[in-house]
Amino acid sequence: MAGEKPGEKPEGSHHSVWELLFHMNYWQEFILAELREEEPESPQDFSESWPGSPFPSNEQQYKETVSQFLKGLGQAVQQASKDSLEEGLGGRKRTPADLLMVLINHNSYHAGQVVYARRLISAWPPSDGDESDE
């Protein structure tokens, strides 16, 4: 998605594609840290999981964020292939399967918003040569 499109807010929409991607990455990284049995710090305010601007600072930042998201999806797939999905993490009742389901639901919900926003700004379907849409 080249140019200004990732930061363009469709009329009547609360978020740009960039904001949605940033938010998805934030919580995906949070959940992946929990799956690694790290203790990520919860945000003081949930607004911290959204960027300060509807626009990425430049096209490179957008592409890097897309890459980070895709890398995180790969890490989630690796976690899903483990045998111990039903064992509590760190003595807690929440299991890796529970966390993966939260990630799936959260990403699915916002991915739908991304597609809808992109349709509204005439950036869907992805063009064939657009590297950031792979």
Image (cartoon, rainbow, N blue to C red):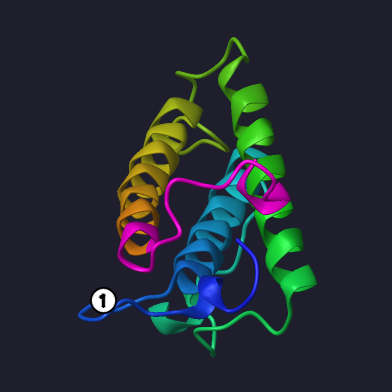
Task: Provide the residue span drawn in magenta.
Answer: 118-134
Q: Residue 63, how many percent across, how many down? A: 73, 61
Front residue of this view, candidates 15 and 133: 133
Q: Look at the image and say whether residue 126 sits in the magenta stretch.
A: yes
Front residue of this view, candidates 24 and 88: 24
Of the 4 image quadrants, the one containing the C terminus is top right
Answer above or below: position of 65 versus 129.
Answer: below
- Side of 102 relative to 90 (left or right): left
Residue carrying label 1: 13
Q: Look at the image and say whether residue 104 sits in the magenta stretch.
A: no
Q: Disc 1 on helix, strand or loop?
A: loop
**Residue ID at (30%, 56%):** 116
Where, by quadrant of the figure, is residue 37 drawn?
top right
Query: Mark 1: which amino acid?
Result: Ser
Answer above or below: position of 131 versus 36.
Answer: below
**Residue ID at (30%, 65%):** 120
| Total marks placed | 1
Q: Residue 93, how many percent across, how many down? A: 39, 35
**Residue ID at (40%, 78%):** 46
Q: Main secondary structure of the magenta part?
A: loop
Of the 4 image quadrants, the one containing the N terminus is bottom right
**Residue ID at (45%, 59%):** 123
Where, by quadrant of the figure, is residue 128 drawn?
top right
